[in-house]
Amino acid sequence: MSKSKPTRAEQLRRHREIFEYALAHGLTLVAAEIAMLREARAARLARQEATRRCGRVIAPASVAVADRPLTPIPVDAPWMMRD
Protein backbone atom coordinates (compact mmCIF):
# COMPACT_ATOMS: atom_id res chain seq x y z
CA MET A 1 0.00 0.00 0.00
CA SER A 2 1.56 3.27 -1.07
CA LYS A 3 1.20 6.57 0.72
CA SER A 4 -0.43 9.47 -1.01
CA LYS A 5 1.67 12.43 -2.04
CA PRO A 6 2.34 14.70 0.97
CA THR A 7 0.72 18.11 0.94
CA ARG A 8 2.84 21.24 0.72
CA ALA A 9 2.32 21.88 4.44
CA GLU A 10 3.58 18.37 5.27
CA GLN A 11 6.61 18.88 3.01
CA LEU A 12 7.47 22.18 4.71
CA ARG A 13 6.92 20.70 8.18
CA ARG A 14 9.28 17.83 7.40
CA HIS A 15 11.89 20.21 5.96
CA ARG A 16 11.70 22.39 9.10
CA GLU A 17 12.21 19.31 11.33
CA ILE A 18 15.24 18.25 9.29
CA PHE A 19 16.61 21.80 9.25
CA GLU A 20 16.30 22.19 13.04
CA TYR A 21 17.92 18.79 13.59
CA ALA A 22 20.77 19.75 11.25
CA LEU A 23 21.36 23.02 13.11
CA ALA A 24 21.26 21.31 16.52
CA HIS A 25 23.73 18.60 15.51
CA GLY A 26 25.96 20.51 13.10
CA LEU A 27 25.09 18.38 10.06
CA THR A 28 24.15 19.00 6.48
CA LEU A 29 20.52 18.62 5.50
CA VAL A 30 21.15 15.27 3.78
CA ALA A 31 23.17 13.90 6.71
CA ALA A 32 20.52 15.14 9.16
CA GLU A 33 17.75 13.41 7.22
CA ILE A 34 19.73 10.15 7.20
CA ALA A 35 20.44 10.46 10.93
CA MET A 36 16.76 11.12 11.65
CA LEU A 37 15.77 8.06 9.62
CA ARG A 38 18.30 5.93 11.54
CA GLU A 39 16.98 7.19 14.89
CA ALA A 40 13.39 6.53 13.85
CA ARG A 41 14.31 3.02 12.75
CA ALA A 42 16.14 2.31 16.02
CA ALA A 43 13.13 3.54 18.02
CA ARG A 44 10.76 1.43 15.91
CA LEU A 45 12.90 -1.68 16.40
CA ALA A 46 13.07 -1.03 20.15
CA ARG A 47 9.27 -0.80 20.30
CA GLN A 48 8.92 -4.00 18.29
CA GLU A 49 11.35 -5.82 20.56
CA ALA A 50 9.50 -4.57 23.64
CA THR A 51 6.20 -5.91 22.30
CA ARG A 52 7.85 -9.21 21.37
CA ARG A 53 9.19 -9.60 24.90
CA CYS A 54 5.96 -8.46 26.53
CA GLY A 55 5.31 -10.63 29.56
CA ARG A 56 8.17 -13.03 28.88
CA VAL A 57 10.93 -11.41 30.91
CA ILE A 58 10.59 -11.39 34.66
CA ALA A 59 13.00 -9.07 36.41
CA PRO A 60 14.48 -10.62 39.55
CA ALA A 61 13.26 -9.07 42.78
CA SER A 62 15.83 -7.16 44.72
CA VAL A 63 17.28 -8.98 47.72
CA ALA A 64 16.28 -6.24 50.17
CA VAL A 65 12.61 -6.49 49.23
CA ALA A 66 12.58 -10.29 49.01
CA ASP A 67 14.03 -10.75 52.53
CA ARG A 68 11.31 -8.91 54.40
CA PRO A 69 7.55 -8.56 53.88
CA LEU A 70 6.14 -5.18 52.91
CA THR A 71 4.01 -5.00 56.08
CA PRO A 72 4.53 -6.76 59.41
CA ILE A 73 2.60 -10.02 59.74
CA PRO A 74 0.16 -9.89 62.69
CA VAL A 75 0.50 -12.75 65.16
CA ASP A 76 -3.24 -13.05 65.77
CA ALA A 77 -4.32 -13.10 62.12
CA PRO A 78 -7.27 -15.46 61.48
CA TRP A 79 -5.33 -17.54 58.96
CA MET A 80 -2.67 -18.13 61.63
CA MET A 81 -5.29 -19.80 63.92
CA ARG A 82 -6.19 -22.62 61.55
CA ASP A 83 -5.51 -26.21 62.53
Image (cartoon, helix red, strand yellow):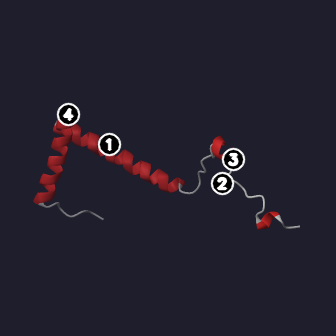
Q: In x, y percent, where is residue 73?
A: 72, 56
- Which mark, by number, is residue 38? 1
- Considering every residue shown, the one lying at the far front of the view is 76
- Which of disc 1 and disc 4 is earlier in sequence? 4
How far apart are the alpha carbons under marks 1 and 2? 48 Å
Real-space Cα distance between discs 4 and 1?
14 Å
Query: Neighbour class for label 3 at 10 Å: few (<14), some, many (≥20)?
Result: few
Tell me the element at label 2. loop
Front tag of 4 and 2: 2
Report x, y in % for residue 27. 20, 33
Q: Residues within 10 Å of mark 4 (few under 14, many from 20)?
A: some
Left or right relative to 11: residue 3? right
- Sequence-wise first label, 4 or 2: 4
Residue type indicated by callout 1: Arg
Camera-nearest residue between 54 and 32: 54
Task: Please tell me whether mark 4 sits on a helix, a strand or a loop.
Answer: loop
Secondary structure state at the residue bearing disc 1? helix
Q: Dot 3: what SS?
A: loop
Mark 3–mark 1 distance (CA, rounded to whole Å): 46 Å
